[in-house]
Image (tube, rainbow, N blue to C red):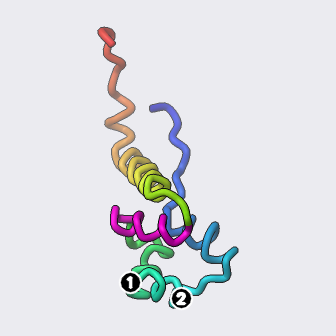
Amino acid sequence: MKKVRPSTHPGIILKEEFAIPLKLTQAKMAEDLHIGIKTISELYNEKRGITPVMALKLSGYFRTTPQFWMNLQNAYDLYKAYEKSKEEIDKIEVCVAA
């Protein structure tokens, strides 16, 4: 990998692209999703990731797909893994048989 674009945490997307424009409070979203307010707070603050169950809940709530939420999480996780191991990863040569 040469250059990896920083991925945005899905909690930031949840807050900035959904909650704020729709004027949803953390309390209202937590109530509607049948989860604790701490869960929403931890998502917003990048202390928690999107689980498959949360992806299903958010997709139903916002009329998106669960894949949308899981793809955001996957992109974020891949970025963080690359950042942690980029020196080792960048040393890998392309397989000539490929």
Q: Is residue 51 magenta?
A: yes
* Marking on residue 81: none
Q: Quadrant of the C terminus?
A: top left
Answer with the quarter of the image where residue 42 lies. Answer: bottom left
Task: Give amino acid for label 2.
Answer: Lys
Segment colored magenta: 50-62
- Secondary structure at badge 2 equals helix
* Marking on residue 28: 2
Q: Taking 71 as reference, is 49 above or below it?
A: below
Task: Give amino acid for label 1.
Answer: Ile
Q: Quadrant of the N terminus?
A: top left
Label 1 packing within 10 angstroms: few (<14), some (14-19), many (20+): some
The location of residue 2, given as percent across then percent down, is 49, 31
Q: Is residue 23 left or right of residue 75?
A: right
- Secondary structure at badge 1 equals loop
Answer with the quarter of the image where residue 39 lies. Answer: bottom left
The mark that comes first in sequence, 2 or 1, is 2
Q: Is residue 58 magenta?
A: yes
Residue 13 or 3: which is nearer the viewer?
13
The location of residue 7, given as percent across then percent down, is 52, 52
Label 2 packing within 10 angstroms: few (<14), some (14-19), many (20+): few
Residue tagged by mark 1?
35
Residue at coordinates 55% horizontally, 68% vertically from top-left? 62
Residue 25 or 43: which is nearer the viewer?
25
SS assignment for the magenta stretch, majority? helix
